[in-house]
């Protein structure tokens, strides 16, 4: 996004601004330009850049807590996953910030989640065929990152304090009393701990949250990566999934890891901490990594089972039995095969041959 430098100087002089003011604002702009970031002087300037009426922008920010929907979706293994979805108006702002600011931040090489041209395959390959795998999960990952930390990130990028406050507000929220009272009893149970937080936090469903979390984790990644290198181990982080791998004696001490993670403002989910040796089920972000990276047999068998019964009993009959309300049945199965293709292309080709033998007309 080009900054009209000469036009800015001309307009600033016409408005009677001093040479010192012009020099200071140009230094501010140049600092952002060097980082390939858009030059934004104020909230009013942001409104002009994104093409939104200033009053509407201010209203969205001041009412941000009411610009989200809260609901639950069932997990396969029981229980519910809580979802917070931004309304279109604030989501539009978040997408602009993501594309023009967040996506341009240089991240740690150890971060593999939500990173362009990286995937769970890249994350798993780092630990392929190692003697010992050490998995650590961070609890309430996005929600642990509060508004103050997001403000600090925008400030560190070079944005003005007042503007950094507003940008942080666009990217964070808390549950208002009005929204909480609209939830069912079971929904309130799942969102209660978020409601009790004293400060607004990163919203898991916001487009900006993955990139912001990676930016804020740069120091964590740096410290854990250096620690791994010191011990001769490998390190990677896919969102809230931290993995170390190496020989039995090369993995970092849990006590040190606990101190570093706590110092960087995160919490360990002790129910998902595990150390796995050769001969045990070694998995990284859902993929088996002993010998070579591959998809667990259970997932592939499930896809073959669906394909078998679709061919034997018909697509409609099969889905009426397992999930009567599921639409886009073929697309659903193709999505699963596409995932297989990203890890095991040859296996996916076998599956596609079976897809071609099925009559998908309902």
Image: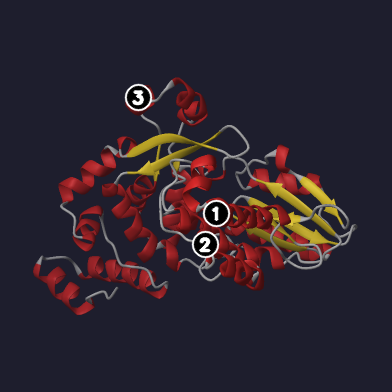
Kindly state the secondary structure of the residue where label 3 is placed: helix
Q: Mark 2 points at which residue?
A: 358
Kindly state the secondary structure of the residue where label 2 is placed: loop
Other-residue count near label 3 (Cα within 10 Å), few / some / many at <14 / 14–19 / ≥20: few
Q: How far apart are marks 2 and 1 (CA)?
A: 7 Å
Kindly state the secondary structure of the residue where label 1 is placed: helix
Q: Residue furthest bottom?
A: 6
Q: Locate residue 104: give its quadrant.
A: bottom left
Labels 3 and 1: the sequence-earlier one: 3
Camera-nearest residue between 291 and 105: 291
Labels 2 and 3: the sequence-earlier one: 3
Position of residue 195 relative to residue 337, above or below, is: above
Camera-nearest residue between 155 and 298: 298
Q: Locate residue 17: give its quadrant.
A: bottom left
Q: Residue furthest left?
A: 14
Q: In the rendering, at what x and y percent does residue 161 appear? A: 36, 52
Discs 3/1, front:
1
Q: Can residue 23 be seen in this view?
A: yes
Q: Mark 3 points at which residue?
A: 182
**Is there CB contact under 8 Å for labels 2 and 1?**
yes
Camera-nearest residue between 335 and 207: 335
Q: In the displayed structure, does residue 359 sit left or right of residue 76?
A: left
Other-residue count near label 1 (Cα within 10 Å), few / some / many at <14 / 14–19 / ≥20: many
Numbered mark located on residue 310 in the image: 1
Q: In the rendering, at what x and y percent does residue 36 appear? A: 39, 73
Camera-nearest residue between 329 and 254: 329
Q: How far apart are marks 3 and 1 (CA)?
A: 41 Å
Q: In the rendering, at what x and y percent does residue 308 appear? A: 61, 56
**Is there CB contact under 8 Å for labels 3 and 1?**
no
Position of residue 2 relative to residue 145, above or below, is: below
């Amino acid at each position: 996004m080009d900054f009209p430098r000469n036009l800015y100087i001309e307009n600033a002089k016409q408005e009677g601004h001093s040479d010192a003011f012009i020099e200071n604002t140009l230094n501010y702009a140049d600092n952002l330009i060097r980082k390939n970031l858009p030059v934004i002087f104020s909230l009013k300037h942001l409104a002009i850049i994104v093409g939104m009426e200033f009053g509407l922008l201010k209203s969205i920010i001041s009412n941000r807590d009411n610009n989200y929907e809260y609901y639950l979706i069932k997990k396969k293994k029981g229980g519910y996953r809580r979802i917070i979805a931004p309304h279109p108006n604030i989501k539009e702002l978040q997408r602009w910030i993501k594309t023009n600011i967040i996506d341009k931040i240089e991240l740690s090489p150890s971060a593999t989640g939500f990173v362009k041209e990286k995937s769970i395959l890249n994350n798993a390959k780092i630990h392929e065929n190692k003697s010992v795998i050490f998995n650590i999960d961070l609890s309430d990952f996005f929600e642990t990152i509060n508004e103050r930390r997001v403000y600090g990130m925008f400030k560190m990028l070079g944005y003005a304090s007042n503007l950094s406050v507003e940008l942080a507000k666009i990217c964070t929220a808390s549950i208002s009393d009005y929204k909480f009272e609209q939830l069912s009893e079971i929904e309130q149970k799942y969102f209660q701990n978020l409601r009790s937080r004293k400060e607004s936090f990163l919203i898991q469903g916001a487009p900006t949250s993955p990139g912001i979390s990676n930016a804020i984790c740069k120091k964590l990644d740096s410290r854990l990566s250096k620690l791994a290198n010191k011990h001769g181990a490998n390190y990677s982080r896919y969102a809230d999934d931290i993995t170390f791998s190496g020989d039995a004696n090369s993995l970092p001490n849990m006590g040190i890891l606990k101190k570093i993670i706590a110092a960087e403002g995160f919490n360990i989910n002790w129910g998902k901490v595990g150390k796995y040796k050769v001969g045990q089920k070694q998995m990284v972000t859902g993929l088996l990594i002993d010998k070579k990276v591959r998809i667990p047999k259970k997932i592939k068998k499930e896809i073959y089972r669906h394909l078998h019964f679709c061919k034997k009993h018909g697509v409609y009959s099969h889905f009426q039995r397992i999930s009567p309300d599921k639409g886009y049945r073929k697309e659903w199965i193709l999505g699963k095969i596409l995932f297989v293709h990203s890890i095991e292309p040859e296996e996916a080709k076998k599956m596609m041959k079976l897809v071609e033998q099925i009559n998908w007309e309902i």
